[in-house]
Image: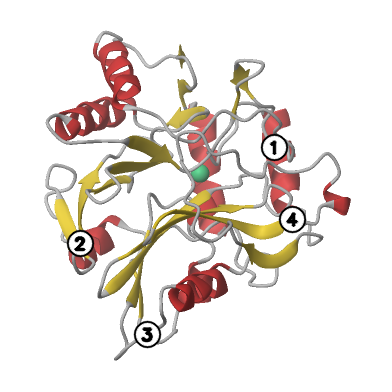
Amino acid sequence: MLIKPSLFIIVTVLLAAIATTASAANVAGDEPTGHYADLATAVWLHGAKSCKNDINPAIQVMQADASTYVLRQNKCVTFEAPFIYVLFGKDKVLVVDTGANQSPEHSPIYQTVESLIEQQGGRINGKPEVLVVHSHSHSDHTKGDSQFHGKPGVEVVGTNTQALETQLGLGDWPTKQSSIDLGGRLLTLIPIPGHQEQSIAIYDPQTEWLLTGDSLYPGSIRVKNWSDYKNSIQRLLEFSRGKPVSLILGSHIEFNAEKNKPYKIGTRYQPHETPLGMYVDQLKVLNDKLQTTTKPKKLKFGRFVISPLSKFEKLLIKALSKSN
Ligand SMILES: [Zn+2]
């Protein structure tokens, strides 16, 4: 997410971003052992009416298969409540995004990843190494990077386009794809600028997931560069053709399934959340609509809404990114 459509909402967001709610316990929540979560239907912790009394973990952990985890920051810690993906191979563990908080006291993302490495049998001869990448460069997905910087066996990919070229092999941006070999798990990276300049998607053949960050998720998707976004969605659809894609998974849930509309922006309590998982059919419907829409405008779909950023919002994002 990151940007809001009116001054009132912007003020709400700034206040919400400044406020920290440290009442949540700072430990990772474990799912029952031997039980894997189905991301198509999983119900997540979704904040609290009163965050003062919230006792849920700062980071919720769901295990999706023997070597795949999905994490969510507690809405009482950050209203953005972004999702973070942790994928293990034999040699490397990939961490996709680090969340909206720098402080390990409020959101111990590094410690959580270390606990998952332990759960997977720990390190042998320095492996697995940790590779941190970002679905895009907005601060609600990169602030936890500081917890990883300087740690042994950790590489954090930078947040500018040059870093994507040099560290991830994504040259000729945005037309060339690249891959990451985690050791028996070869992932494909697909540039998808539009929501933000450095947006990427990641395809994992093990889970058959397509990770789309803030470019496609159940909620209010804001688009900075409409024509880039249109081209990216078309490329993503072309990529998905002929490949098994079990789920499309983004970085937020902002859609109320009961009321059939997005939640109020900045809320810390989201009862009746729609599931995180989306499908290629929804990507196809989005692409069809974008291809027949000539000018940037708000487009409503079943479980998500696309809308262009105003000039003012673009300026505000620039100012916010400088202050981060
Ligand atoms: Zn976001």
Q: Nearer the viewer, residue 54 or 116?
A: 116
Q: Nearer the viewer, residue 277 or 14?
A: 277
Q: Tell me the crowding category of disc 1: few under 14, some 14 to 19, or many 20 or more residues within 10 angstroms, Cα based.
A: many
Which residue has dot 4 on it? 56
Alpha carbons under labels 3 and 2: distance apart = 20 Å
First in residue order: circle 1 vs circle 3:
3
What is the three-letter code of the residue carrying label 3? Arg
Choose mark 4 or mark 1, whichever is in front.
Answer: 4
Alpha carbons under labels 1 and 2: distance apart = 35 Å
On the question of residue 299 being in view, the answer is yes
Which residue has dot 2 on it? 180
Residue 79 picture quarter: top right
For residue 232, side relative to residue 68 (left or right):
left
Choose mark 1 or mark 3, whichever is in front.
Answer: 3
Given contact means CB atoms under 8 Å apart, are the residues at marks 3 and 2 in contact? no
Which residue has dot 3 on it? 123
Alpha carbons under labels 4 and 2: distance apart = 34 Å
Which residue has dot 1 on it? 266
